[in-house]
Image (tube, grey):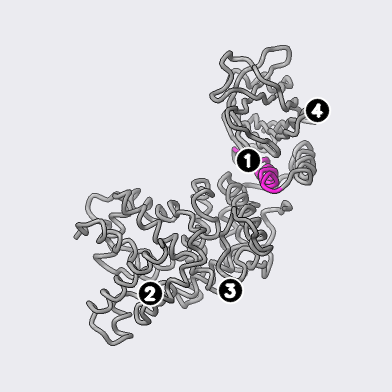
Amino acid sequence: MTIRAPAHAPRAGAPFSSAFPAGRRWCMTGMMDIPAGVIAASEERRRLAGTLAAVGAGSAAAMADLYSRTSAKLYGICLRILRDEAEAEEVLQETYVTVWRKAAAFDPGRASPITWLAVVARNKAIDRLRGRPSAPAAGLDAAAEVASDEASAFDLVAEAEESGRIAGCLDELDPPARTAIRSAFFEGASYPELAEREGVPLGTMKSWVRRGLMRLKGCLER
Amino acid sequence: MTPATHEERDTLAAEYALGLLEGEARAEAQRLESADPEFRASLARWLGRLAPLLDEVEPVQPRARVWARLESRFGPQAAGPVQEPPSNIVQLRRKVVLWRSWAAGATAIAASLALFLVTRPDAPPAVAPAAAPAPMVAMLEAGGSEAKLAATYDPAAGTLVVVPAVLNGAAGHEHQLWLIPRGGSPHPIGMVRPGQPMRMKMPGEMMPEMERGAVLAVSVEPTGGSPTGLPTGPVIASGRFSRS
């Protein structure tokens, strides 16, 4: 790792593939006979965790490094959900401002850095899509609202053992449930939108999705 | 309405994690997220289950203007004028780079952390850059021991950062840090763990001793630290703070 001045522009086209290699096993660690690509991924994970720790300690240089290595992935996520460049750019900015403020609280034992970053970006994109709640519920002060923003992302449990299986488990679902869950996840589609697309009553869509989610959970826990 | 059963709350967490909810249901999920630890754990598990799907999303390089807008928030403008680091920091970096090449695997990351940590000013340098005394550094090592640690002391902020570049732990003992004033006896100042940089406020009475060139040492002690208040186990690394 080299030190770069904070003023450096991020490397254009920094390969994200090292953090997210092809296939879905980018979080695997601690196994025997790991393929070389996965070892590289776990090295990258460690490196990102170190960078994130340095960001948490207030290093602007580390922030530039983090941005150069992760922004393309996070921007891809924002763009996929928001389908609008200007909005996706704004959400990407918000994401990194949040990361700058909260990096010190990130626990590498509970989630891989890239998973955490991706989830924070996606949550913010969904927030943008839904609009912020018009007024906080009674009894909730501003601090609680802020706390709720990314609290769950911080609690992210390490999903290493499940990372290769979610796609397989989705494939086991009935096609309508699978399509609905994927559309919700990747495009931020809401229940009414999904029901309209499929031309079914809202209640039907809800029960498809809920049944699908519970089967998904069962499959992942097998 | 708050879902009554555990299953219903888990379903709500899954729907919220997926991003399906709108309006009232979404507000309720957000309320539970901040108020109910069990709901938050459930939500975190669902986010963890679903997150690997994000691997399918193709990266798209954002335009340079995004970073240009962001940079000022954590870049040199925000932190004050860019200053050349003191020469001792440059030396420490070189040393840590050297250590990195000796150290294998996981310890490399601890060493690279040192590179970042030592560059972080605790007080904004813009306030009084000329008046701030330069940081002091110490490289801790000892013959017959693999342990290597880097320490920096920032007199302006009174903070000490210790980064274990190479430090091997073993069950049943801990590594205790000792500050030894010139001509004085060791003061216990804390524990250091393998792979974990530690940062602490220097006790006020020790600050003048730093200027006189105190030694920082690491000894192996029983869990919980030395029972006597003085090192009881072997000193596996030590080094004197200096500015040159």
Residue that numbered label 3 is attached to: B60
How far is mark 3 from mark 4, CA to CA? 51 Å
The stretch of residues the image draws in magenta is B105-122
Residue that numbered label 4 is attached to: B143
Q: Is residue B80 above or below residue A214?
A: above
For badge 2, the amino acid type reads Ile
Q: Residue B122: x and y, percent?
A: 60, 38
Does the magenta segment cover residue B115?
yes
For image coordinates 79% across by 28% down, the residue present is B144
Asked if marks 1 and 4 fall on the same chain, the answer is yes
Quarter of the image for residue B180 reads top right
Q: Chain of mark 3?
A: B
A191 vs A163, left or right, is left
Q: Secondary structure at mark 1?
A: loop
For image coordinates 35% across by 48% down, the residue present is A143
For badge 1, the amino acid type reads Gly
Residue that numbered label 2 is attached to: A181
Q: Return the residue found at the far bottom.
A: A199
Asked if marks 3 and 4 fall on the same chain, the answer is yes
Q: Nearer the viewer, mark 3 or mark 4?
A: 4
Q: Residues within 10 Å of mark 2 (few under 14, many from 20)?
A: many
Q: On residue B195, which mark appears?
A: 1
In this view, the residue in front, B43 or A128, is B43
Q: Given contact means CB atoms under 8 Å apart, are the residues at marks 4 and 2 in contact?
A: no
Q: Chain of mark 4?
A: B
Q: Given contact means CB atoms under 8 Å apart, are the residues at marks 3 and 4 in contact?
A: no
Q: Nearer the viewer, mark 3 or mark 1?
A: 1
